[in-house]
């Protein structure tokens, strides 16, 4: 880590990037890449796609940096871009009707102790059922249930009202139950 | 499928550690290279757009002129009327704006 950028708030780094300091953006990437990779890993099918999504997020953020007003933390603003990028990927995938393998990816390690009671077969069925959801349903469940974001955070990230988040989450859970039931019965 | 079972499965999926460290390695360096490349390509695009601008402007003016000449309903109607032998009436209407 560059000692000049260490400890500098994100908002100050953004100002430095706008002034033409490329090293400041490198520091922003270093700080936020893990969160973006974790979010993208919930959507990506392989490591190539994971890297592609992460790159697209940071390119978009760089191009839109002039529009960042600082009314929300930089991390939240970046998460919004990441969500939109993931959403676009899901939509494109649905349009192309790509058959995907949703077994455990290379970056998903063995189950920790507290989840060992769940059969891998059931988890694989859940992953397949999630793939069957509509992109907006999947995004809302990913943010609320897997990323553990609050309703307020999810509303900001998805750029919808909190009431709308609750409605979509309810519908998504209902749809997921139906899909999961099918997967467990036929899988 | 009950809610409790769904919650248990979602919790299990959430609890699975996501380790992307290997893929993340050197990401910022790769990312900066991508951005540098994009910046290097930008001037070439702008240069081409600047060079082609007069051609597009001329084309736009030509198309605009043609549309104005051909599609103007009033002008067309008067020309037709004159051709049909109502020159005098049409000319008075045209001049007085009726």
Image (tube, rainbow, N blue to C red):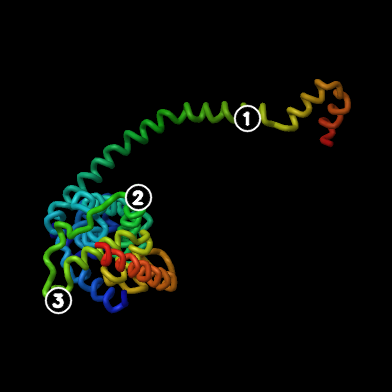
Q: Is residue A101 above or below residue A139?
A: above
The quarter in which the N terminus of chain A is drawn is bottom left
Question: How far apart in space, not on screen, are marks 2 and 3 (Cα)?
Answer: 35 Å
The residue under the point 13% across, 52% down is B26
Q: Which residue is mark 2?
A: A92
Mark 3 and mark 1, same subunit? Answer: no
Considering every residue shown, the one lying at the far front of the view is A186
Q: Position of residue B8 (x, y in %)?
A: 24, 75
Image-quadrant location for residue A27: bottom left
Of A183 and A83, nearer the camera is: A183
Q: Tell whether A162 sits left or right of A42.
A: right
**Above or below for A118 versus A34:** below
Disc 3: which residue: A114
Residue A106 x/y as whole percent: 14, 57
Q: Residues within 10 Å of mark 2 (few under 14, many from 20)?
A: few
Say whether mark 1 and mark 2 are on the same chain: no
Q: Position of residue A118 (x, y in %)?
A: 18, 72
Q: Are marks 3 and 1 in contact (CB under 8 Å)?
A: no
Measured Cα–Cα span from mark 3 to mark 1: 73 Å
Tell me what residue is drawn at x 29 percent, y 37 percent. Answer: B41
> Dot 3, how many residues are within 10 Å of its Cα: few (below 14), some (14-19), or many (20+)?
few
| Residue A163 picture quarter | bottom left
Please name whichever residue, B33 or A11, is drawn nearer the observer in this view of the structure.
Answer: B33
Viewer-nearest of discs 3 and 1: 3
Chain for mark 3? Answer: A
Which residue carries the number 1 mark?
A: B67
Q: Nearer the viewer, residue A101 or B87?
A: A101
Q: Secondary structure at mark 1?
A: helix
The image position of residue A3, as x and y in percent, is 13, 60
């Amino acid at each position: 880590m560059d000692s000049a950028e260490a400890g500098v708030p994100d908002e100050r780094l953004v100002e430095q990037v706008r002034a033409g300091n490329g090293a400041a953006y490198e520091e922003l990437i270093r700080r936020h890449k893990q969160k973006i990779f974790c979010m993208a890993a919930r959507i990506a099918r392989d490591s190539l796609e994971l890297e592609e999504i992460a790159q697209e997020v940071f390119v978009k953020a760089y191009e839109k940096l002039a529009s960042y007003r600082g009314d929300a933390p930089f991390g939240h603003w970046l998460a919004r871009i990441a969500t939109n990028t993931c959403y676009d990927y899901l939509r494109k995938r649905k349009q192309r009707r790509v058959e995907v393998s949703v077994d455990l990816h290379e970056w998903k390690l063995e189950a920790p102790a507290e989840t060992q009671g769940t059969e891998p077969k059931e988890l694989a069925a859940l992953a397949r059922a999630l793939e069957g959801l509509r992109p907006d349903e999947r995004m809302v469940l990913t943010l609320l249930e897997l990323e553990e974001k609050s309703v307020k955070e999810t509303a900001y990230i998805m750029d919808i009202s909190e009431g709308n988040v609750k409605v979509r989450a309810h519908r998504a859970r209902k749809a997921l139950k139906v899909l999961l039931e099918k997967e467990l019965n036929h899988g | 499928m009950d809610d409790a079972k769904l919650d248990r499965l979602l919790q299990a999926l959430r609890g699975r550690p996501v380790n992307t460290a290997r893929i993340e390695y050197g990401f910022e360096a790769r990312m900066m290279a991508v951005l540098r490349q994009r910046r290097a390509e930008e001037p070439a695009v702008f240069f081409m757009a600047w060079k082609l601008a007069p051609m597009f402007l001329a084309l736009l003016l030509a198309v605009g002129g043609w549309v104005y000449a051909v599609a103007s309903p009033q002008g067309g109607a008067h020309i037709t009327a004159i051709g049909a032998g109502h020159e005098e009436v049409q000319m008075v209407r045209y001049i007085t704006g009726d």
